[in-house]
Image (cartoon, rainbow, N blue to C red):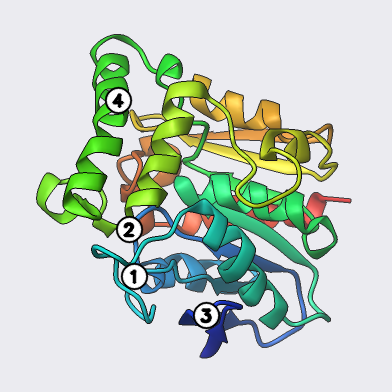
Amino acid sequence: MSLVELPIVAGDGHASLLRLHRTAEPGPGLFWMPALGVPAAKYDAFAKALVAEGVTCAVHEWRGNASSSLRARRGVDWGYRELLQHDLPASIAALDSATRWYFGGHSLGGQLAAMAAARQPHASAGLALVATGVPQASTFRGRQRLGVGLFAGVLPLLTRVAGYYPGHRLGFAGREAGQLMRDWGATVRTGRYDHYGHRDDLDSVLARLQQPVLGVRMTRDWLVPEASMQALLGKVGSGVKSVERFDDARLGARADHFRWMRQPQALAACIAAWMRASP
């Protein structure tokens, strides 16, 4: 396996590195989008496990993280619009055109992977969505529903007062852009995706997507309840949809929102098998 860091410059000048883990022999590829606040390098073990299964993996770096040239602060802001209009198209353009690429992502990355595929359907052969779903408060239960709803409710005021989202102090995500968190919070409240610079709202664009989709849920993942995953699958067009669930025994580790990243071999094998079986 070889790791190459490809320099990416978005249309608005934002620069980052795309971490490309290549197989020795030709095969399919997975263009991967990380969870909120997680640097691309944190997925190296997952990418290596995919390479061992014959799958090339390119891991996107989110604006504001690690190799990104920007950091969120007062006066430096962005949201889903910039990620979808500038950053993701720049990384997609850098992918090897000879490879059959699938899009995939973890948590918020899975949501944006689906949106990116909907906006550029000819670039993606299918979607692998891991530990992700629509974060609408109503998909949660009991105190979790109340807590998620209250958190989303205070985000507009919090981010405007601070000038950014101080997640490194609050214990959820990292230092994030205010508009990014306001976009996330709006989906928590409404369950919908807005236009984000596209002529149509993303719900309408997602509904037109016709690609195979794999949804993977970790059974101890309280951040993505079953209803949340199903809500996202329900938005993504009429392609063939498959669902895989990982408990501790199948994963070989605690099957929660993040722990799978430490022992990703079983998940990588599952995704690779699904890619090989896809039309």
* Lower sequence index among marks 1 and 2: 2
Q: Which mark, by number, is residue 154? A: none
Q: Nearer the viewer, mark 3 or mark 4?
A: 4
Q: Which residue is mark 3?
A: 18
Look at the numbered disc 2 and give the secondary structure of its residue.
loop
Element type where label 4 sits in the image: helix
Q: Position of residue 247 (x, y in %)?
A: 41, 33
Q: Is residue 181 above or below residue 228?
A: below
For disc 2, the neighbor class at 10 Å (few under 14, some 14 to 19, many from 20) is many
Spatial separation of the CA atoms under disc 4 and disc 1:
24 Å
Q: CA distance from mark 2 to mark 4?
A: 18 Å
Q: Is residue 210 above or below residue 50?
A: above
Q: Residue under circle 2?
A: 37
> Left or right: 155 with respect to 61?
left
In this view, 8 is above or below 268: below
Q: What's under tag 4, amino acid-wise?
A: Val
Q: Amino acid at mark 2?
A: Gly
Q: Rate crowding at label 4 as few (under 14), some (14 to 19) or many (20 or more) other CA atoms within 10 Å.
A: many
The mark closer to the camera, 3 or 1, is: 1
Q: Which mark is residue 148?
A: 4
Identify the residue at image location x=81%, y=55%: 121
- Give the position of the N terminus as an image quadrant: bottom right
Residue at 29 percent of width and 71 percent of height: 71
Please tell me which residue lies in front, 179 or 67.
179
Q: Earlier in the sequence, mark 3 or mark 4?
A: 3
- The residue drawn where x is 75% and y is 69% is 28
At x 71%, y 78%, the residue is: 93
